[in-house]
Structures are given as structure tokens and as C-alpha cells.
Image (cartoon, rainbow, N blue to C red):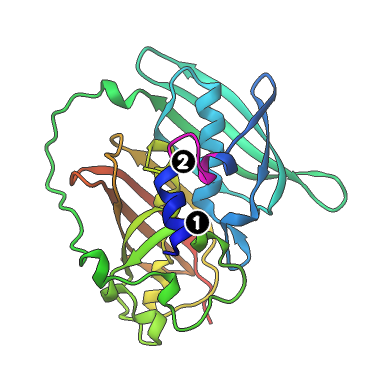
Amino acid sequence: MPEAASVQAARATIGDSEFDRDTAVTPRGAGVYDVDLSAGWTIINAVNGGYLLAVLGRALADALPHSDPFTVSAHYLTASQPGPAVIRTDVVRTGRTLSTGQASLFQYDDEGREVERIRVLASYGDLDTLPDDVRTTALPPAIPPMDQCFGPQDAPAPIPGSSAITDRLFLKLDPATLGWALGAPSGKGEMRAWFGLADGRDADPLSLLLAVDALPPTAFEIGLSGWVPTVELTVHVRSRPAPGPLRVSITTRNLAGGFLEEDAEVWDSEDRLVAQSRQLARARLA
């Protein structure tokens, strides 16, 4: 990381970082928010789905009486573009420990008609009130130390189209999942990496919605290339992450009919499983 970026990394905090500014929403009226989708979170020619989910997640955190996402399910209806958008939220139910709401993000087409991009149903609560009892057979992913992993800056050639999001992420990928970058994909459908934000901001529940969808697609390691658009993405946030880098592991076990699933796990610096997700994505077959 350049020296200037390292200085910036030491300053960024939760609530005062590029991620927070670019996911900020402005209340317009009851349950309605304006947002400007940043071009800084695009990859190839698309706004990243995890970034979009964080934007909607921030609006729901404001609209609901609880602030932490527990489960968020999103259907991606049409491709979002950088620029102005409107989010409309509805409170479905409020309770003592959980509240549920829905939200949709809209943009306008060339003829000025409103187009729905994403629709979300989510339940929110307070992660700090959850009991400490953990009973699990899950294990953190085995990823080599950071200095033995590789980031976008180590790629032999730039990604075609926009790669703006890579400038905003700290990514160090497991060499065992990088065969695709060298023209020799393993065929295993696995992707593992150390993950963080480039400006040094620690992770929180909202940024976990980004983390589950920020690595290169597992389709690359299966032997496919190009955009892998998300159809549906469900995220479960299990705990507030401890400070420090995250480890993200994503696997695909089945590609059929032009669709594949991606199962993600996010582990924090204290070896806790802090988020899980599953998404269905469309594969561009040759």
C-alpha cells in the first residue's frame, strides 16, 4: 500500500470513512431516502451487489427501531448504475428483540420512468444482547499469512472494464484460489482471502454485507470469465466483528442450468464466524 494510503488507513474510523460516506442516505420523508450510488464501488461494468446491499441496509437501520442487521435477503431485479437513486422502506413488524422491514431501491430510465433495481426483506436486532453460548463444528478457513497472499496490485494484467472497487478494498487472496488469474483455474469453485477496507476502517455489521460479495467470483476458478450477476443474496450476521482483518471463504458446489450458488463465511480476528451468506448467480456460459 502506498505511504499516503497507509497514513489514511490509520485515520479512518467507523462512521468516518469512504465506505460510510458512499453508503450514506438522506431522509426525504417518512421511510423514503435519497442516495447517490458511487462509481467507486464498480467492478467490470456493474455496481457491486454487496455495496448496494450495504446502502439498503443503512436505510433500514434508520427506518427500524433496531440498528443491527440479523438477516437480509435481496433480489436483484435490474442492474444498478452509479448516480442518484431513491430507497423506499416499509416497517413490517416491530418487536422487543427483532424488527422486520422491507426496502426497494429505484432509479430512473432514459425516459424518466422509475425502475426498481433491488428489493430487500430484512430483520434487525441488537447484536450486543445475544448470549455468548457458541456450539459449532465450523472452523476458520486455512489461509496462508498475508505476506504469502496476493492482491489486485499483483495481477499480471488489469481487469477489463472498471476495477474501481479494488482501490477501496484491502484484499489478499489465497494463492490456492488464484489459478484463474494465471490461466489455469483449479475447477474447484473456491475463493479465500484476507479482507478489509483500504482506508483501515474496522468492520461492523453493515460492512459485513459488503464483505460476503467482495471477492472475485468463484466462477473464475471453475473456468468461466466475465460478469456473474447476482439474482438473490441472503446474509446472516451472527456477531459484531472484532477489530482487525477478516477472513472470507466462498465455495460453489453446483453449477447447473446456467446458475451457480456461492456460500460465504466471514471470520473475524478472534476466530469467530461473524457472517454467512448464500447467493444464486447467473453464469455466463460460452
Q: Say whether residue 14 is magenta.
A: yes
Residue 168's mark?
A: 1
User: Which range of residues does the magenta coloring cover?
Assistant: 12-20
Query: Of residues 143 and 85, which is closer to you in this image?
Result: 143
Q: Considering only vertical position in the picture, is 172 above or below 198?
A: below
Dot placed on the residue nearer the N-terminal end, 1 or 2: 2
Give the side of residue 155 with respect to residue 55, left or right: left
What residue sits 15% from the left and 52% below the top? 139
Label 1 Cα crowd, 10 Å radius (few <14 / some 14-19 / many 20+):
some
Residue visible at 33% across and 68% down?
173
Residue 86 screen position, x and y as percent: 70, 36
Q: Is residue 100 above or below residue 13?
A: above
The numbered disc on residue 80 is: none
Q: Residue at x 43, y 78 (%)?
A: 155
Direction from residue 240 to residue 217 in the image, left or right: right
Q: Amino acid at mark 1?
A: Arg
Residue 179 on image: x %, y %: 34, 81
Q: Position of residue 13 (x, y in %)?
A: 43, 38
Instruction: Determine the residue located farthest toward the top in the rendered image.
Output: 96
Image-quadrant location for residue 59: top right
Residue 214 seen from this side: no
User: Which secondary structure type mostly characterizes the magenta part of the structure?
Assistant: loop
- Whether residues under marks 1 and 2 lie with C-beta atoms below 8 angstroms apart, the answer is no
- Tell how many labels: 2
Residue 30 relative to residue 223: left or right: right
| Residue 258 visible (yes or no) | yes
